[in-house]
Image (cartoon, rainbow, N blue to C red):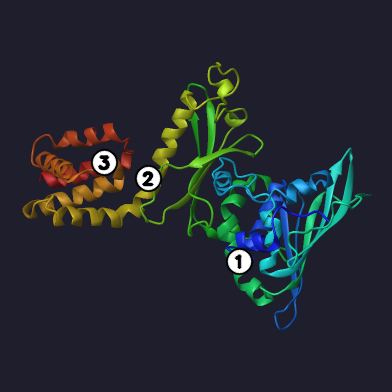
Amino acid sequence: MPKIQITAKGIKSALKKYTPYLSIAEYIWNGFDAQASEIKIDYVSDKLGNLESFTIADNGYGIDHAKLQEKFEPLFESKKALENKLKKNQSAIHGKNGIGRLTFFCFARNAAWKTVFAKDGSNFYYDIYANSENINLYTGVSAVPRKTQLPTGTEVTFSGIHGLTGFGLQEKLSEFLLKEFAWFLALNSGRNFSILINGEPLAWESLIAEKEQSQIMHEKSQTVFNLTYVRWNEKSSNEASRYYYIDETQHEKWKEATAIKSKGEQFYHSVFVQSPYFNSFAFKKSAAQENQQPLLAGTRSDSQFRFLQKNLANLLRIKRRPFLKAFAQDLAAEYTQKNVIATDLHEKLAITIQTLYEIQPRLFASQNLEQKKFLANTLNLLLHSNQLGQLTSVIHSIVELNPEEKAELEELFNDKAE
């Protein structure tokens, strides 16, 4: 019986942070990493809530028998290596090698895998088994895979369950999985990805607070980008606010953090950008490509991509503004408290500073006390001069204003000029 490269005690110690729900999430990620589009969680409990059966199944490509040891044994890489995996710019390969497959010990004594994989035009089936007492051992390497007509995929059955109840799963599992997977299901909605719990699809759209779809076109190249902006009503358990770039076949090509640096305003968001433009886009060039002239692949230096970035930044700036109101009020209070705004000037400047902060907080970022006073005094002079009409143009040269924001500033300044 092959042995995983660490003792059972060592494995449990390394995985001590896992809870039953985190473990379930790891099994789901394993399925998606195996290119599954559907994950099924099924359980049966008695009247007292005791689980009589509990399985997690996926329709991915299964565990190739020739790669079984590779899937179960390279468990412990360095902490830095594992952290780097989580920072990848693609959502696939989310699981952490064999870690997810061994976390069952936190809620069950036994785990049994039935897996079907494809090889040479046929599908083959075999079993794997592990128990929590000897979690560093597993069966399956000596098994002889048999041909089957079953589709590829993996089903894990857990027994000897001690950390879960039917009542708990009914009350908490959906809520937990929503925060873990809503963004991923949204990302793959064009491919009809789903998680089913006892036959009921996880209603990931219930976590959406706001959704807006739009289309922009780069006129010179006629490149079209389809944008889907989503604001979530709760923070994801494992994913920051990001841009996701999706190709013509609805596959994710790249992801990266949005430019919004959260200040605690609970502006949780995702922006999905779909376009054939990303079919062959060089998001990150290898060292060998650095000095090569791109032929067919787009690059970040393209006018199309720069156009896209500008529009995405403006979209999020506008969407974020309502969440900055409280911070704008705090900023005006801070300016008064630190005598950045003199008491006799407060009423004239406070609303102006608040409005400018809501439109573009970067105007007030990383300033020392002297710089804050200079900005406040400059605004005050303009508010009391015949140059007030130019202030909107000055601000527009720093950050592009939409028509509504320009009108709001002009109205604000006109009120101050009277």
Spatial separation of the CA atoms under disc 2 and disc 1: 39 Å
Nearest to N terminus: mark 2 or mark 1: 1
Q: Position of residue 353 (x, y in %)?
A: 21, 48
**What mark, if any, has residue 318 been given in the picture?**
2
Q: Position of residue 336 (x, y in %)?
A: 14, 55
Tag 2: amino acid? Ile
Tag 1: amino acid? Thr
In the image shown, does 7 or 240 lie closer to the viewer? 7
In the image shown, does 145 or 210 lie closer to the viewer? 145
Specify whether 169 is left or right of 391: right
Nearest to N terminus: mark 1 or mark 3: 1
**What mark, if any, has residue 19 been given in the picture?**
1
Tag 3: amino acid? Leu
Are the residues tagged 2 and 3 within 8 Å (C-beta)? no
- The quadrant in which the N terminus is found is bottom right
Spatial separation of the CA atoms under disc 2 and disc 3: 15 Å
